[in-house]
Amino acid sequence: MTFIVTDDFWELFPTARIGVLTAHGLVRDAAAVAAAATLLADVAAGRAAELVGVDIATHPAVAPWRAAYRRFGLKPSQYRSSIESLLRAAQAGRTRSIEPLVDLYNAVSLRHALPCGGEDLAALVGPVRLTRAVGGEPFRTIGATADDPPQPGEVVYRDDVGVICRGWNWREAERTRLRDQTQAALLVFEALPEHPPQVLDHALNDMAELVGRQLAATTRWCVLTQSSPMCDLPPA
């Protein structure tokens, strides 16, 4: 299986950097569940203290994503990047534990102020592409009962079955979402040119260390750029 960022994406965002991390052999015992939830709560509380009185829409971690969403036709007031949603949740004291791997990547996302999402590797079919939608591709977000297809030109992640994440990092699909029984996962961090390159590397290293120490997983990661747009994904 491969992960590829297509030319039509690079035409719109030529200096973006995409961090791709895989984790295999995930173990979720009671200690891991508690530790991940505690870490997320602690990181969120720290962010909340920093965000008192802050206008999230103009926050330096959020404003570039709002501009990026406008570039591919989504209204950022209606479609919020994952990092904007996380920061708003932290500011309002609404951050909640979901499952250990999601808790860990949300904690790392908040800590480094970068979007992150995850998929169950075993649920993916064919190569994963970060690309732009034709429009109308199958997509059903987590917990939904009906499809909500992407708009033409929208930045999406997809596999051979359909879209697995809409709006670049806005909403993930029910079909490939991370579950308690997920044994192998694909995690993706995203950085725009406004973010220093080392921030993405630090986030990936942080994620790899946490997943290895708390969930006993083996990991590997790479960073994709316009000059290096593809990597292999180990099988689930």
Image (cartoon, rainbow, N blue to C red):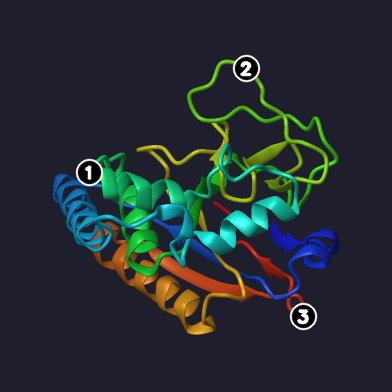
User: Three-letter amino acid code at disc 2?
Assistant: Ala
- Left or right: 200 in relation to 100: right
- The amino acid pointed to by label 1 is Gly
Quarter of the image for residue 42 reads bottom left
Disc 3 marks which residue? 227
Residue at 44% in and 60% down: 23
> Across the whole image, how many numbered discs are drawn on residues?
3
Question: Is residue 46 shown left or right of residue 112?
Answer: left
Residue 213 sits above or below residue 103 on the image: below
Badge 1 marks a residue whose secondary structure is: loop
Tag 2 or tag 3, which sits nearer the N-term? 2
Dots 3 and 1: beta carbons under 8 Å? no
Residue 189 at least partly seen: no
- The residue furthest top is 145
Where residue 146 is drawn, which disc sits there? 2
C-alpha gap between disc 3 and disc 2: 38 Å
Q: Quadrant of the N terminus?
A: bottom right
Q: Position of residue 231 (x, y in %)?
A: 68, 69
Q: Residue 89 vs residue 169: left or right? A: left
Tell me which numbered mark, 1 or 2, is placed earlier along the sequence: 1
Vertically, is 224 above or below 159? below
Which class describes the residues within 10 Å of circle 2: few (<14), some (14-19), or many (20+)?
A: few
